[in-house]
Amino acid sequence: MKQMSLDLELVYIRDVQFGSETKVRDHVLYINREELLEVIRDKAFDSVEVELARPGESVRIIPVKDAIEPRIKPDSGDFFPGLLGGFDGVGEGRTRVLKGCCVITTGQIVCFQEGLIDMTGPCEEYCIYSKMNNVVLVAEPVEGISPEHHEEAVRMAGIRMAHYLAKASVDAEVDERKTYTLPPVPAEKKLPRLLYVNLVLAQGLLHDNYIYGSDCKKLQTMLMHPNEMMDGAIVSGNCVTACDKNTTYDHENNPVVEDMYARHGVDLEFMGVISSPISTMLAEKERGVMAIVTLARLLSADGLVVTEEGGGNPEADLMLIAEKAEKAGIKVVMGLHENAGDDGASESLANTNPVADAVMTAGNNNEFILLPPMDKVIGHLEAVDVLAGGVSNALRPDGSVNVRLAVIMDASSNLGITRISATTY
């Protein structure tokens, strides 16, 4: 059987600028602003604007909804299957990537369940997007629009932006190629067989993801090839706390997938990805866990690496997986962040189980950090006082903000796609 093989063709972007033509030249992405504005216009928006935010600039972006890395299939021109493109070739062939560039979408959709990015200052030590050349969508909704329609309009505008920018890379020189395939591991190596369980929010009330264009609330637990995630199969529709959400960029660049790929055939056998929706209902949680364990047993997996999305309620899913899988003789390692209080001394999880004894932490969401004022704000600075996980008096008269890590995009990501690290003693 021919194995799926995906070549990521990386084009490194060192700067973004507006110009007369959208193109990549000498590692600079030039953008025709008027063309891009036409791509993102929508009757749901009263106004649209595009701003640029580069590393080291005194810029604050708030409130942030999503982050998207521009990617495209150069042979077909497609990407984001089920939303913008078709399904042929997903997870194999060639995918062109604008590396070091990101589309950032903003909007007061649910008002408090968004985040912030500073392009300089202490925030850049926690936020991966502070180190990227960001193309920022600023779209103000028409009066009377529902939050659901507003979220859909922003989500679709963001992926259209990313697709438009990625087209500029098709004729650019490729800086690096990375090939991703899962060749069979010889049985005599006797490596542990591991599956990655990717839990995705599917809770309604704008706590949703989209797999191949379908709302995850309508989907069941499924087995996926990890290459599908790199090829835009999962798009975030989440309006949740900044550190709780896995952005579209996170799905495209999932670090667990990357690490398990690097170790495939070395000290483990990477069997694939199980994507499973996280519901608010206990019966749905139990059904999802049953399917996860059944798939793992069917594939003779020795262990599961599990990451959550969200916090609180999804920790019930984590503990149920640990309980049921360990009972079936399957080891479980999980990655998550903590809500351990300002001093780190409080109970860090909403749900625990003694069998969950192998846990990787991405940090404490509740830790405070003082961010200095920025010279420029893209968006609405006043939103900082109502961001989930923050405090009501975060904004100070001089423009500085005293916030928890929870409000900084990906500062303590459940996936570990964060600049926070730990030392083993």
Image (spheres, helix red, strand yellow):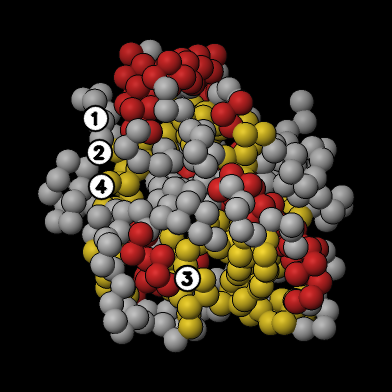
Quadrant for the N terminus in the image: top right
Which numbered tag is attached to residue 352?
Answer: 1
| Label 1 CA crowd tier, 10 Å (few <14, some 14–19, many 20+) | some
Distance from disc 2 to disc 4, alpha carbons, whole Å, reads: 6 Å
Q: Quadrant of residue 163?
A: bottom right
**Residue indicated by mark 4:** 339
Distance from disc 4 to disc 3, alpha carbons, whole Å, reads: 26 Å
Check disc 1 and report its element: helix, strand or loop.
loop
Which dot, 2 or 3, sits closer to the camera?
3
Q: Is residue 80 left or right of residue 56?
A: right
- 171 over 91 or under it: above or below: below
- Residue 409 image point, x, y percent: 44, 60
Check disc 4 and report its element: helix, strand or loop.
loop
**Residue indicated by mark 2:** 349
Assess whether mark 4 and mark 2 are in contact (beta carbons under 8 angstroms): yes
Number of numbered discs: 4
Identified at 35% across, 53% down, the residue is 388
Evaluate whether residue 158 shows in this view. no
Check disc 3 and report its element: helix, strand or loop.
loop
Identified at 26% across, 67% down, the residue is 393
Disc nearer the start of the sequence (4/3): 4
Disc nearer the start of the sequence (3/1): 1
**Residue indicated by mark 3:** 380
Type of the residue with mark 1: Thr
- Residue 56 image point, x, y percent: 48, 82
Disc nearer the start of the sequence (2/4): 4
- 238 over 358 or under it: above or below: below
Distance from disc 2 to disc 3, alpha carbons, whole Å, reads: 32 Å
Q: Quadrant of residue 224?
A: top right
Type of the residue with mark 2: Leu
Type of the residue with mark 3: His
Assess whether mark 2 and mark 1 are in contact (beta carbons under 8 angstroms): yes
